[in-house]
Amino acid sequence: MLKFGEFIARHRALILVIGILLLFPAAIGYINTRVNYDILSYLPDDIETMQGQEILKEEFGQGGFSFVMTEGMTEKEIADTADKISKVDHVSDVVCYEKLTDLNVPKEILPQKVYDFFNKGDNTLMAVFFDDTTSADTTLKAIDEMRDITAENCFISGMSAITDDMKHLSDSESIIYAVIAVILTSAVLILTMDSFLIPVFFMLSIGMAIVWNLGSNFVMGEISFITQALALVLQLGVTMDYSIFLWHSYKEQQLSYADKNEAMAHAIAQTVTSVVSSSFTTVAGFLAMCFMTFTLGLDLGIVMAKGVICGVIACVTVLPAMILIFDKAIAKTSHRDILPSFEKTSSFIVKRAGIFITAALVLLIPAAYGYNNYSVYYKLDSTLPKELDSVIANTKLAEEYNMNSTHILLADSDMERKKTKKMLAELEKVDGVQFTMGFDSLVGSAIPDEVIPEDVKSILKGDEWQLILIGSEYEVASDAVNDQVTALNRVIEKYDPKAMLIGEAPATKDLIEITDRDFKIVSILSIAAIFLIIAFTFRSVSLPVILVSVIELAIMINLGISYYTDTKLPFIASVVIGTIQLGATVDYAILMTTRYRTERADGKDKKEAVQTALGASIRSIITSALGFFAATVGVAVYSEIGMISSLCLLLSRGALISMVVVIGVLPSMFMLFDKLICKTSAGFGQEKKRHIFRTAH
């Protein structure tokens, strides 16, 4: 690695130019990477709700749909509005009461339930179908155009409208995320580093790595909005340690080598060895997410694993080049260390190891209980700002029509009318069902098939399947609607075993069941992977158990706090925190353990070794944790997207909790289990034994 370091130091200008030039294709890739705002689209393709979506699109030419509610409009105004909406690109069909009665069907002979479905007081409902999926770019563009051409007393509800608002909100916030994260992290670095200028070069080199990473997402085709929002702050927080390590190594090497190029070459060589091994735990945590059948985990896992790799590359190439080129300017802005040495702190903790172990055991009980009992939510719009158009529309729909969700039933098109009507009647008896609406709801003895307009018929009935809408008073992701979906499927199974119940609520029910299984698997995989990496790194049986247990305690405390503060967390919180907090902050424990092993190998007794290891590591751990905290806490406070805000709050809090637990509990664990560690680990006390052997002879 020394030759590699010498190459970087010798060709520093070229390296910096290459790093800058790579920003251009990366920027192009970033601009052309599609962002997906639909969480449900990451469900497995082979489940019924996803297969039904494909059938809906193939046979009916429909993907997403929205309800448009008008308020206080005349019949002519409603008809004009429906006509305007039908002309919007990628709107496939519009169904309203006025359209049903526009041609050959007199209003008087239509069933009363049809009128009641579309009308409530001075409110009228129309169903708008799109020719592409719920979150497709064309669908979201159609939503925007519909909002432009409709009056203020028209309210567009549904998942597509929510997704569109989520897109605009996320796009408007993403640049602010970067600005806040950079400002707060730079402030922490200025206070914890020994130069006012070095944080600038840290931010520039990490910024380059972030752009490279986000630009390379182009090969994936698209990424989720959650990945896009978290990637920047996570990569900044997670990879900043590598830059700090390089800088400290460079300063240390300057004491041995007068030539700055030679000092940097040795610093790079040392950094590559340490940082690459350190990054394994973080990468392992992210890659564990790739084994989820809910492919949002794959999306986030790959992007963040790439981000760590890009961060390592930038740390040992671009950052050294910047430091060498601007060495004089950095030297001029040097200042004394602001952080204290923490010698008294380390002595205090080691002397009271029993107290800290006892405190950890006492905390474990409520932390474990809170960890296993905090509440989660799956309904994204439940935490969005109440003033968003889609949230207002959904609220009005619930208030005026008592309709909080809509299911779509795909049934056999050739089912006998008598059988279909019997099924619809039974479906309407299920708790919480407000209405059922299909082709056979419109026809009867007074209205033959031929009278129904062909464009209306084509919406509800195809060659193989017929489409039936089922309105529910229950909210998506609630226990009530999940029980309702189960009850509806039992009824449907009796009449048509091949029928499919699809829509947001059934898909969310699948999401709950799938992610519950996924998260358990990912948790086991991430712990196992990091356990093995630690075992291999330290050639130890006991240390992996101790280190992973310490960070798992921090994770339990972090998530458990949400139970005691009665805070609902997004459903992906456990897997994001369980993998990222473990993978990123276990490095704090590894850093201290490495020094502890060195001190024990040099012949020091356990108390002196532990105290020295803690004293030498505490400043680096605090700097790293505060940097991670700064990178995420600003986004947590600023973001109006509940899911992003909650995850960033958990990550920022988790960094501080891991810091406190590692500094307080881990040294105490070393004191308690020192004999076990020495007996079950390689490299502890070996130097002392050899020294005794040489003295005896």
Image (cartoon, rainbow, N blue to C red):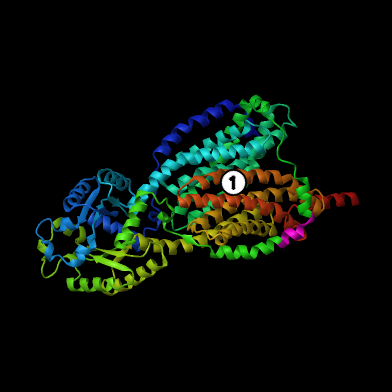
Quadrant assignment, res 443? bottom left
Q: Residue at 38% x, 54% y: name it.
A: 41
Of residues 534 and 516, which is closer to you in this image? 516
Magenta extent: 351-358
Task: Say if the magenta span includes residue 295.
Answer: no
Going by the image, does 133 lie left or right of 530?
left
Q: Is residue 78 at all visible to an observer of this figure?
A: yes
Residue 636: give x, y in percent of width and height: 52, 48
Task: Say if the magenta span includes residue 352.
Answer: yes
Quadrant assignment, res 505? bottom left
Name of the residue lying farthest toward the right: 696
Q: Is residue 51 at all visible to an observer of this figure?
A: no
Name of the residue lying farthest toward the top: 328
Characterize the local packing of mark 1: few (<14), some (14-19) or many (20 or more) Cα atoms within 10 angstroms.
many
Residue kind at label 1, given as amino acid type: Phe
Of residues 196 and 577, which is closer to you in this image? 196
Residue 264: give x, y in percent of width and height: 66, 32
Magenta span: helix, strand or loop, mainly? helix
Q: Looking at the image, is 257 positioned above or below residue 91? A: above
The residue that label 1 is drawn on is 629
Q: Looking at the image, is 21 positioned above or below residue 294? A: above
